[in-house]
Amino acid sequence: MSESPDAAAPRKDWARQPSTALFWWGLPLAIGLSAHFLRFSFRAGAGVCAVALAWMAAGCLLNARRCRRVHCYIAGPVLLSGAIFAALAAAGIIAPGPRTFANAVSAILLLALLSFVPEMLWKRYA
């Protein structure tokens, strides 16, 4: 008798495996924070932030496809929108002030964190 797809989802979930969770979400967060503390120029820091957010978005989107995790379906697009915002700021296409940029990135990360709430209220895997 084969396993139901729902029974296999937790084993496929990268967020439940420490090494992949560190690679997809821990490492880019550490790189983004270090760029902030290393006092890069605004555009360079925004570029690092764009790469870090895109990296985390890719992890969420791939994980959503892999295991159908509800959090990843929500956080992936949220992080991707943050990456696009940061890339536009890094390229000089938009010109938010440093405080506005930091607040926007903080809001993106908060929304990604809040995307765990539907899992608590509903279920972890779609």
Image: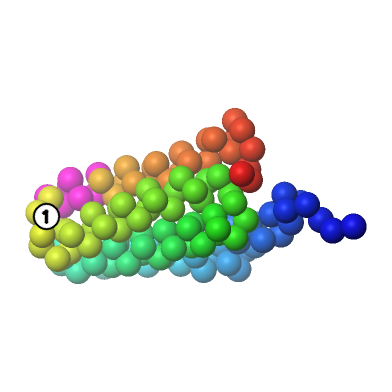
Using the rendered image of the protein, determine whether residue 84 is visible from the camera's viewpoint: yes
Q: 49 or 11, which is in the foreground?
A: 11
Task: Determine the residue positioned at 55% across, 58% down.
Answer: 65
Q: Would you place residue 123 above or below residue 84 in this image?
A: above
Q: Quadrant of residue 56?
A: bottom left
Left or right, residue 11 beside residue 65: right
Q: Quadrant of the N terminus?
A: bottom right
Q: Would you place residue 50 above or below residue 118 in this image?
A: below
Residue 45 magenta-drawn? no
Left or right, residue 79 beside residue 93: right
Residue 58, x across and y down, in percent: 44, 63
Residue 9, x across and y down, in percent: 69, 54
What is the secondary structure assignment of the residue under circle 1? loop
Residue 64, x across and y down, in percent: 54, 55
For badge 1, the amino acid type reads Ile
Task: Determine the residue positioned at 12% across, 50% down.
Answer: 97
Count the marks.
Answer: 1
Question: Residue furthest toward the top?
Answer: 121
Residue 70, x across and y down, in percent: 55, 45
Residue 99 magenta-drawn? yes
Q: 66 or 26, which is in the foreground?
A: 66
Q: Would you place residue 126 above or below residue 45 in this image?
A: above
Instruction: Identify the magenta region.
Output: 97-103
Q: Main secondary structure of the magenta part?
A: helix
Task: Determine the residue positioned at 49% across, 57% down.
Answer: 60
Colour mode of the rendering: rainbow
Residue with the mark numbered 1 = 94
Q: Residues within 10 Å of mark 1 (few under 14, many from 20)?
A: few
Left or right, residue 59 beside residue 43: right
Left or right, residue 72 beside residue 108: right
Q: Quadrant of the C terminus?
A: top right
Using the rendered image of the protein, determine whether residue 25 is visible from the camera's viewpoint: no
